[in-house]
């Protein structure tokens, strides 16, 4: 018969076991964020499920078990369960709440983030220097990345992206500047491009040769913004950056690409894409968005720096990336493309979860090292 003392000891042992297991899980996932640990743990369990029960003869989908598990989790998030008939600003605010990766990709504890404003021609832009290193640097590294986040020009911010950008800083051994550009529907294209251009001119004003050690990088709408910035730099005959990296760039806001309606996409749904375009451009008629000032795929890529493209084949913007690659090739740009078979929109961002993302980021790292050495 169990005594009270035995029960107390049993309870104590159970509690101690729970604490030890919790600590070990936190150490394993390198996080104390409960939501992140829960997401990672669920992902791990789903991965084992797919390893045990997936059919070995499934030749249609060669993605990793880790990716399949992540895909299942993303499908449950319902990022785009939005009432698009409501007031546009209310919809945008709701989307901004949902479009957050801070629990999925938390900031590392050693990552240093400093807010920094830049001014040029009496105009000010806001952003953050991100540096993931053992010791806090007082100044950015010799080489830098200007990063433009995605979010359909509606959502995305430093809070949601800093975990991923910290990883880029660590992996590439480089300081990253995250621009908090103005977003739709409060502001529209091409006004949004002005923020990126002001930043670039301000950096040049501080160091006239900074372009030689600067790479522009962006995902989704941030990829489109990266292209629009370079096109303006070329047009205004400013010094050209060393390179440009585009992850699933959203570059055709007329949505004429074949893939816009072909694929189910974990990160986008077509109806929301149409709504976002109208907010970002102010045009109800999508055909009006062939203007290169809003859709860079219709602009020129002449005199562009070396370009690295990444895109998945299970996403809405595949056509955009392929069109960019084809046109850049025709205009003699040194362009390289990496196509992720059966992978989602901006798949390299989620590097914590599947090897396909890690491989692409490692490929980009090698490309950066080569570009900066040339």
Image (cartoon, grey):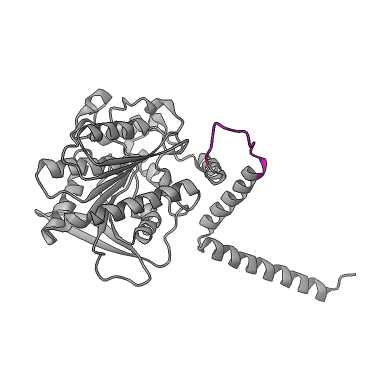
* Quadrant housing residue 167: bottom left
Q: Is residue 122 magenta?
A: no
Q: Outermost residue toward the right?
A: 1
Seen from the viewer's position, the closer of residues 358 and 349 is 358
Q: Is residue 214 left or right of residue 112?
A: left
Tell me which residue sits at (23%, 28%) in the image: 289
Q: Is residue 160 above or below residue 272?
A: below
Tell me which residue sits at (35%, 53%) in the image: 366
Regarding residue 79, the answer to whether it shows in the image is yes
Helix, strand or loop: magenta stretch: loop
Q: How many marks?
A: 0
Q: Is residue 62 magenta?
A: yes
Instruction: Name the image quarter holding the N terminus.
Output: bottom right
Seen from the viewer's position, the closer of residues 344 and 62 is 62
* Quadrant housing residue 310: top left
Q: Is residue 22 left or right of residue 111?
A: right
Q: Which residues are magenta?
A: 52-63
Q: Outermost residue toward the bottom?
A: 5
| Residue 348 location (% of width, % of height) | 41, 47
Seen from the viewer's position, the closer of residues 14 and 246 is 246
Tell me which residue sits at (31%, 36%) in the image: 250
| Residue 83 location (% of width, % of height) | 42, 34
Q: Is residue 261 above or below residue 17?
A: above
| Residue 213 location (% of width, % of height) | 21, 57
Q: Outermost residue toward the front?
A: 374
* Quadrant housing residue 173: bottom left
| Residue 320 location (% of width, % of height) | 32, 32
Regarding residue 285, the answer to whether it shows in the image is no
């Amino acid at each position: 018969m169990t005594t009270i003392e035995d029960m107390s000891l049993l309870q104590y042992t159970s509690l101690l076991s729970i604490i030890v297991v919790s600590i070990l899980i936190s150490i394993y996932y390198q996080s104390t964020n409960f939501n992140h640990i829960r997401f990672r743990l669920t992902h791990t369990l789903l991965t084992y499920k797919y390893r045990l029960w997936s059919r070995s003869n499934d030749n249609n989908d060669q993605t990793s078990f880790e990716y399949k598990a992540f895909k299942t989790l993303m499908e449950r998030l319902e990022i785009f369960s939005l009432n698009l008939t409501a007031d546009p600003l209310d919809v945008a605010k709701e989307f901004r709440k949902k479009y957050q990766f801070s629990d999925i990709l938390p900031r590392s504890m050693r990552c240093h983030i400093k807010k920094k404003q830049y001014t040029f021609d009496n105009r000010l832009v806001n952003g953050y220097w991100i540096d993931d290193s053992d010791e806090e640097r007082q100044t950015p590294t010799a080489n830098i990345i200007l990063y433009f986040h995605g979010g359909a020009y509606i959502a995305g911010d430093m809070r949601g992206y800093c975990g991923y950008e910290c990883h880029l800083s660590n992996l590439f051994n480089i300081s990253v500047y995250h621009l908090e550009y103005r977003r739709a529907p409060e502001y529209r294209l091409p006004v949004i491009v002005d923020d990126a251009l002001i930043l670039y001119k301000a950096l040049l004003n501080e160091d006239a040769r900074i372009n030689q050690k600067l790479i522009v990088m962006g995902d989704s709408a941030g990829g489109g913004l990266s292209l629009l910035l370079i096109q303006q730099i070329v047009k205004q005959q400013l010094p050209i950056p060393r390179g440009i990296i585009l992850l699933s760039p959203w570059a055709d806001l007329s949505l004429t690409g074949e893939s816009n309606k072909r694929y189910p996409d974990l990160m986008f749904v077509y109806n929301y894409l149409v709504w976002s375009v109208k907010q970002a451009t102010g045009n109800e008629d999508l055909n009006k968005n062939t203007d290169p000032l809003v859709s860079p795929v219709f602009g020129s890529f002449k005199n562009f720096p070396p370009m690295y493209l990444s895109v998945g084949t299970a996403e809405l913007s595949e056509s955009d990336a392929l069109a960019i690659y084809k046109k850049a090739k025709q205009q003699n740009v040194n362009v390289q493309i990496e196509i992720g078979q059966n992978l989602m929109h901006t798949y390299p961002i989620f590097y914590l979860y599947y090897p396909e993302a890690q491989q692409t980021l490692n490929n980009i790292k090698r490309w950066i090292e080569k570009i900066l050495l040339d």
